[in-house]
Image (spheres, helix red, strand yellow):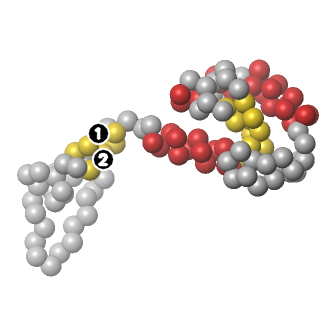
Amino acid sequence: MAKPQYNYEHQKARRDALALFVDGTRCPFCRKPMRVWQSLDLDHRTPVVHGGSAGPTRLAHSYCNRKAGGLIGNRSAKRRVRNGRAVRIGRTPDKNSSHIKGGNPPTKGTRTLPQW
């Protein structure tokens, strides 16, 4: 199912932008020329996670746009710090992991990895 910010108006805006597209325009992310035969997305200048669903848009390579969105999404994921390490909320490490306070330390000559 399509996300709310990609409704009919967004799809129509993408079609209109593609109709006005000039072959060879530079991608705002990678600065390489965009071609009519390439897959192009209508990018929100203000990221959707920051409330940019109704703001100005521009065309960009699909790969570049989705990569940028993925990076923003990963940076804004809910995280907390446990003993100096970032841990995603909702995940609990194995109690025997050596980096958790109170866990059993590894024996000499063995290498233990946390069980996530």
Name the residue tied to disc 1: 80
Picture coordinates of residue 3, whole percent (x, y)? 63, 27
Where residue 69 is drawn, which disc sits there? Answer: none
- Identify the secondary structure beneath mark 1: strand
Residue 28 visible in the current orientation: yes
- Identify the secondary structure beneath mark 2: strand
Q: Earlier in the sequence, mark 1 or mark 2?
A: 1
Quadrant occupied by the N terminus: top right
Q: Quadrant of residue 87?
A: top left
Picture coordinates of residue 114, whole percent (x, y)? 25, 58
Q: Residues within 10 Å of mark 2 (few under 14, many from 20)?
A: few
Residue 1 visible in the current orientation: no
Residue type indicated by callout 1: Arg
Q: Residue at x 15, y 79 (%)?
A: 109
Q: Quadrant of residue 28?
A: top right
Where residue 86 is drawn, which disc sits there? Answer: 2
Picture coordinates of residue 36, whole percent (x, y)? 89, 47
Q: Residues within 10 Å of mark 1 (few under 14, many from 20)?
A: few
Disc 1 from disc 2: Cα separation? 6 Å
Direction bottom: furthest residue: 109
Q: Residue at x 30, y 53 (%)?
A: 116
Q: Residue at x 52, y 41 (%)?
A: 72
Q: Residue at x 87, y 29 (%)?
A: 16
Label pair 1/2, CB-CB below 8 angstroms: yes
Residue type indicated by callout 2: Ala
